[in-house]
Amino acid sequence: MSFGETPITIIGNLTADPELKFTASGQALAKFTVASTPRTFDREANQWKDGTSTFFRCAAWRALAEHVADSLGKGSRVVLSGRIRQHDWQTPEGENRSMLAVEVDEIGASLRFTTVTINAKRTGGNGGAAPSGDPWNTGDNRPEQGNEPPF
């Protein structure tokens, strides 16, 4: 993260399936919206009440974009971290417009109300195999003697 950026963490639900597109140069881009709704317990009514929802327009790039599109769908509860970006443009009528959006750095399913199964997808051009000498190689789930991580 660069100096002066505004980091944000959001917990909420996708309002629709992510939209996966590719730029002219072939970069994957996933666009989606996350709704975050605060809930408070009303002791007098003895029930939970929803507050006003906030909707965050989000964008994920490259491999993360493809993983988002492959893994998440409408209603998925997620925890994400990213950076707020302002986008400015001019309409065909000459009106200046701007909007805030979240450029997503990390995203995952929330485990608060559900369980998930992780299907590791290795990338890097080596056919899915872990790099040799990688102490985190989980091929046989046993680290070689002396290759334990130092903690």
Image (cartoon, rainbow, N blue to C red):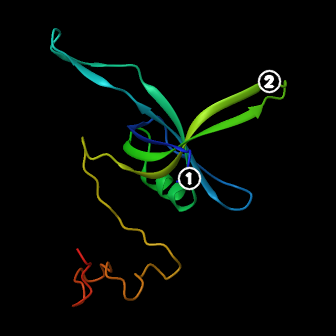
Q: Secondary structure at mark 1?
A: loop
| Residue designated by label 2 | 95
Disc 2 crowd rating (10 Å Cα; few below 14, some 14-19, many 20+) is few
Q: Give the mark toward the camera: 2 or 1.
A: 1
Q: Is residue 68 above or below residue 127?
A: above
Q: Position of residue 52 (x, y in %)?
A: 40, 19
Tell me the distance, in whole angstroms, between the alpha carbons under discs 2 and 1. 31 Å
Tell me the number on the disc at residue 54. Answer: none
Residue 86, horizontal then vertical, whole percent: 63, 37
Drawn side of residue 50 relative to residue 89, left or right: left
Q: Residue, x 67% and y 37% (percent of image)?
A: 87
Residue 79: image x %, image y %? Answer: 37, 45
> Which quadrant of the figure contains the C terminus?
bottom left
User: Disc 1 residue type?
Assistant: Ser
Image position, residue 60 (x, y; %): 54, 51
Q: Residues within 10 Å of mark 1 (few under 14, many from 20)?
A: few
Residue at point 45%, 27% (across, down): 54
Q: Is residue 98 left or right of residue 43?
A: right
Of residue 103 and residue 12, the one placed in the foreground of this image is 103
Which residue does the numbered mark 1 point to in the structure image?
A: 2
SS at badge 2:
loop
Res 45 quadrant in image = top left
5 horizontally vs 140: left or right: right
